[in-house]
Amino acid sequence: MAKEIIIRFYRGDSMRGTFRLGDRLLIEPVLFVDIYPGDVIVYRGTNEQGNVEDVVHRVVAITETGLITRGDNNRRHDFAPVQRDQITGKVVEMERGGRKQVVVGGAKGLRRAKLQWAILRLDRFVRLLFRFPYHKLRNSQIIPKLWRPVITEIHLKTERGPLVKYIYKRRTVAVWDVSQHKFDCRNPFDLVISRPDETK
């Protein structure tokens, strides 16, 4: 009897580094006893708004209370253990840009994820370490005198109101949502792009 294969397109950020937005995931139904630490599973979970949705995360451990899971791009394990009736299946293959790739699970997958989690911890440490000097550098206005990247402003009209995008070499490096007064700027471009409502 053939297994029923499920196809999902990945969306979200919690598995970044393993999956990208729009990756095509091939999911196979799996028995609970055939799930091992390191496998990437799909299960029905509840988001912060209380809505039920499909979650794609890696199994970290198997306990008496259920499966302990975590996203490869998350700093912590998921709050609640996953129960067998929540599981949709196991991600066995990923397709990106027409190229198929086996999704590594088991002990090898867990080692790879642990390395990624260690990099996340190191990244957080470095950010905390350099937060104060970086803040001082940004306030000093020295960098705009030394570094003058060519940044293009694109003004857009959206359903939610005006939006300004800042483009550097065909890449959006900052967005100003005028109606929400929300400014989002990537490092290190925040050293040379000032928040629009703070200028003048």
Image: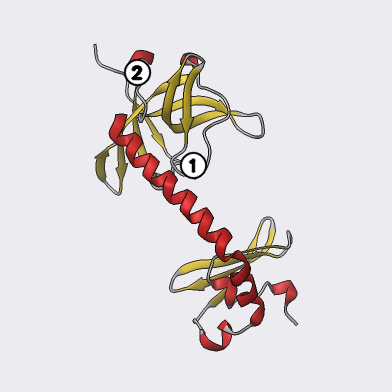
Location of the C terminus by quadrant is: bottom right
Q: Quadrant location of residue 48?
A: top right
Q: How far, Cα to Cα, is label 2 from label 1? A: 22 Å
Element under label 1? loop
Examine the rendered structure and indicate whether residue 126 appears above or below residue 196: above
- Measuring from the top left, give residue 99's x and y in whole percent: 25, 45
Q: Position of residue 170 (x, y in %)?
A: 44, 70
Camera sees residue 112: yes
Quadrant in which the N terminus appears = top left
Total numbered labels: 2
Question: Horizontal placement of 153 versus 63: left or right?
Answer: right
Q: Image quadrant of residue 52?
A: top right
Where residue 141 sits in the image (x, y, percent)? 63, 83
Query: Which residue, given by chain and number where applicable, does mark 2 sit on?
Result: 30
**Could you tell me the amino acid type at mark 1?**
Ser
Query: 61 or 28: nearer the eye?
Result: 61
Which amino acid type is shown beneath numbered disc 2?
Val
Q: Residue 36, relative to residue 102: is it above or below?
A: above
Q: Left of 187 or right of it: where is 57? A: left
- Crowding around mark 1 (Cα neighbors within 10 Å: few <14, some 14 to 19, many 20+) is some
Q: Residue at x 72, y 79 (%)?
A: 199
Q: Are marks 2 and 1 in contact (CB under 8 Å)?
A: no
77 relative to 62, above or below: below
The residue sitting at 53% across, 54% down in the picture is 124
Q: Is residue 113 above or below residue 87?
A: below
Q: Secondary structure at mark 2?
A: loop
Q: Residue beneath label 1, please?
A: 14
* Residues packed near mark 2 inside 10 Å, few (<14), some (14 to 19) or many (20 plus): some
Q: Is residue 21 visible?
A: no
